Each structure stands twice: as structure tokens, then as C-alpha cells.
Image (spheres, rainbow, N blue to C red):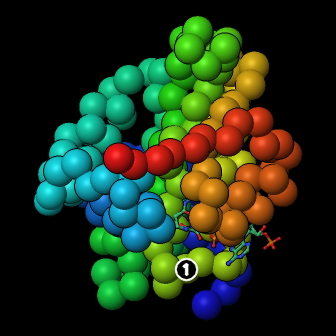
Amino acid sequence: MADADFIVREAQPEDVPAAAALGAELVRFHHALDPQRFAILADPLEPGYERFLAGRLRDHSAVVLAAKLESGGTGADDAGGGIIGYAFGQLEPVNWFELLDACGRFHDLMVHPAHRGRGVGKALARAMLDRLRQRGAARIVLSAAWANPPARQLFEALGFRPTMVEMTREF
Ligand SMILES: CC(C)(COP(=O)(O)OP(=O)(O)OC[C@H]1O[C@@H](n2cnc3c(N)ncnc32)[C@H](O)[C@@H]1OP(=O)(O)O)[C@@H](O)C(=O)NCCC(=O)NCCS
């Protein structure tokens, strides 16, 4: 498969089921990293994620991006409709508990396993930074699981620095 056989664009309503399927996989991915910390709060996850993302498409403070195979895909190695990755972020107000001024929050980034390691994640992340900046974000903040070195390396390569360490214990 050629290197740049995909495009990154604002998600369209027809992309939502595939993006929601990837979002559900993102939840399961985190659950597998640390089942105690990353709870699966509702199953099946896809319907709720679909409703959530559909709402975000109508919300100007939110950015939902899709990476789509230019060939359209076959559904065999994509999430449907040629969608191979998605990203979600939004503008958020001041958060006093976190001593965090208004910012863009980069919440979700997921690439279909069949298409990892060839620039899709970085392209989605760069596009998310551009969009949030264009919409007025002076800073972008994200959280990456400690047990997820690929994500931490990707974000550090894009200029993010570690700023908080979340710690958890159970009773
Ligand atoms: C993390 C993820 C989004 C990366 O997507 P990708 O398309 O494979 O990433 P890219 O090919 O664009 O690689 C970009 C950078 O990520 C880092 N990276 C990607 N895969 C990596 C791996 N297996 N190990 C270490 N670093 C890795 C590297 O810094 C890489 O840059 P390089 O190619 O110049 O070395 C993807 O692995 C994924 O969806 N993982 C599961 C969900 C997840 O972790 N989401 C992010 C947290 S919300």
C-alpha cells in the first residue's frame, strides 16, 4: 500500500458509525492496559459513542477528524467506509481544579491496527492541533496512558511535554 493513500478531513455524518467503532476500540484498548483504572462504563459501547460523536459534529467547539482511504476501502481492513482513523478534541473553559486556563483538549486518537506505523496517527494529530489552534486555542492539553509508550512518543515528537502524572490506587 502506498504511503499517502489516505486523506484527513473533518468527519462527515456518514463517517460517524466507523469513528464510533474506533472510539469503542479505544475504550477497550485502555481497559486492556489497566482494567482497574480504565473502566468500561457501558457495553455495547458503539451506540453511545455514535450518539456522542454525532452531537459533536454540530458543536462548533468540537473537532472530529477522520482519516479515510482514498480508494474508499473494502471494509475488510478498515472501520467501514474506508475510515482508518479518527480524532476528537474540543475547546474547553478554565478548569480551576487543574489550574488550567481555557485550552484545546485533545481527547481521542485511534488508528485501525491494520494501518498503524505509516503516518496516519501523526497526520490526524497534526490536523487536530491546526484545527484547535484556528479555533482560538492558545494551548493544547492531552492525557496519555502511562502504559502507552507509542502514544507518548508520538505526542512528544509533536512538541508536547509531560506536565502531570495521574496516580491511582484501589481499595
Ligand atoms: C498511537 C497511535 C495513534 C499511533 O498511530 P500510527 O498511525 O501508528 O502512528 P504514526 O505512524 O503516525 O507514527 C507517529 C509516531 O508515533 C510513535 N509511534 C507509533 N507507533 C509506535 C510504536 N509502536 N512504538 C513507539 N512509538 C511509536 C513514533 O514516535 C512515530 O514517529 P516515527 O514514525 O517518526 O517514529 C496508534 O498506535 C493507535 O491507535 N494506538 C491505540 C490507541 C492509542 O494509543 N491512542 C492514543 C492515545 S488516546
Q: Residue at x 74, y 53 (%)?
A: 155
Which of the 4 image quadrants contains residue 102?
top right
Judge whether 43 appears above or below 167 on screen: below
Closer to us: 163 or 59? 163
Q: In this picture, is 133 found above or below 79?
A: above
| Depth check, front residue: 100 or 164 | 164
Q: Is residue 166 above or below residue 66?
A: above
- 89 left or right, relative to 80: right
Residue that appears at 55% across and 22% down: 91
**Where does the image place residue 89, in percent across and percent down from the top left?**
52, 36
- Residue 12 appears in view: yes
Q: Is mark 1 within 8 Å of ligand 1?
A: yes
Which residue shows up at 44% across the image and 63% down it? Answer: 34
Q: Which residue position is annotated with label 1?
A: 115
User: Which of 143/9 is in front?
Assistant: 143
Q: Can residue 135 be seen here?
A: no
Whole-percent x, y for residue 165 in the image:
67, 41
Rendered location of residue 30, percent (x, y) = 44, 61
Q: Residue at horizontal 39%, vertical 85%?
A: 77
Q: Secondary structure at mark 1?
A: helix
Q: Quadrant of ligand 1?
A: bottom right
Q: Position of residue 49 (x, y in %)?
A: 26, 47
Going by the numbered disc 1, the residue's amino acid type is: His
* Identity of the residue furthest to the front in this view: 171
Give the left or right position of residue 157, taking residue 68 as reference: right
Image quadrant where residue 6 sits: bottom right
Image quarter where the N terminus lies is bottom right
Number of callouts in the render? 1
Answer with left or right where residue 101 lies relative to residue 19: right
Binning the other alpha carbons within 10 Å of mark 1 as few (below 14), some (14 to 19) or many (20 upward) gives: some
